[in-house]
Amino acid sequence: MLVKWEGIVIRSVDYGESSKVVTLFTRENGKLGLMARGAKKTKSRLAAVSQLFSHGYYLCKAGPGTGMPDLSQGDIMESFRDLRQSLGATAYAAYIAELLDRLTHEREPNPYLFQLLLHTFRYLDEGRDAEILCRIFETKMLIVAGISPQLSACANCGAQREPYAISVSQGGLLCPVCLPADPYAIAVTPSTWKLLRLFQVFDLERLGDIEVKPATRNQLKHVLRSFMDEHLDLRLKSRSFLEQLERMERLPMKDSE
């Protein structure tokens, strides 16, 4: 039986001498693995459509069981060429794709996540602020993982009492009265926790220009990574490479001519 899915390639692994196992995140069925036979051959019609980050329609031959479908052909809608030509954008996109891959299960439809991934890649391709896009995506994925921090009031007593710190162990904001409950609570500015709260409910399609100070960027990253490191057992290869780039003084979104 032939089926057609709209999908984005989030992982591509060599298989044997000439083939690839491609992981798509599809609009219709969530994450799916496909066998792209002969895709490693330069003249293969599957070579381009099996490239990482490609967005398109994929025609597949699916059997009656639950085995891996064979990719028959594909029609690329967006290759994100500019994204691929920027080391910084590519590093962020690889991290975002791997994070999505690790926090989702096979064949669980989630059109919202598909749209989130698609718009994130489009903005990266346009040269938008990759670091902030990454922070927004991480915030959304904490919701998917069920460990989203409580940011509307104190997670310990429920009071709305500033100034807040953020506690990973307590699951969100801590007011001054409850601060002794976690000696390791992260000191943050109001801008940081308010941005995190905005990111939780923010519709990425409405993204405009966001100006974020370097100190706030560092706090956003520290809070989000602390939640992931504490509550999720993830060892992402792409994160290690990305962090090397993030330690550079400046991460250009476009390679110099």
Image: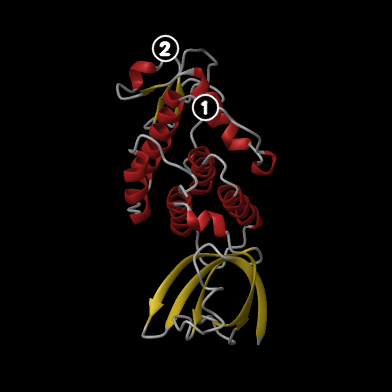
Q: Nearer the viewer, residue 50 or 227?
A: 50
* Residue type for callout 1: Val
Q: Secondary structure at mark 1?
A: loop
* Residue type for callout 2: Val
Q: Nearer the viewer, residue 121 or 2?
A: 121
57 up-or-down from 84: above or below: below
Q: Nearer the viewer, residue 133 or 83?
A: 83
What mark, if any, has residue 212 been given in the picture?
1
Image location of residue 95, percent across then percent down:
43, 52
Image location of residue 197, percent across then percent down:
56, 30
What mark, if any, has residue 177 been given in the picture?
2
Image location of residue 6, percent across then percent down:
66, 68
Q: Secondary structure at mark 2?
A: loop
Taking the spot 48% from the left edge, 34% from the top edge, the residue there is: 149
Taking the spot 64% from the left edge, 68% from the top edge, the residue there is: 56
What mark, if any, has residue 106 been given in the picture?
none
164 up-or-down from 143: above or below: above
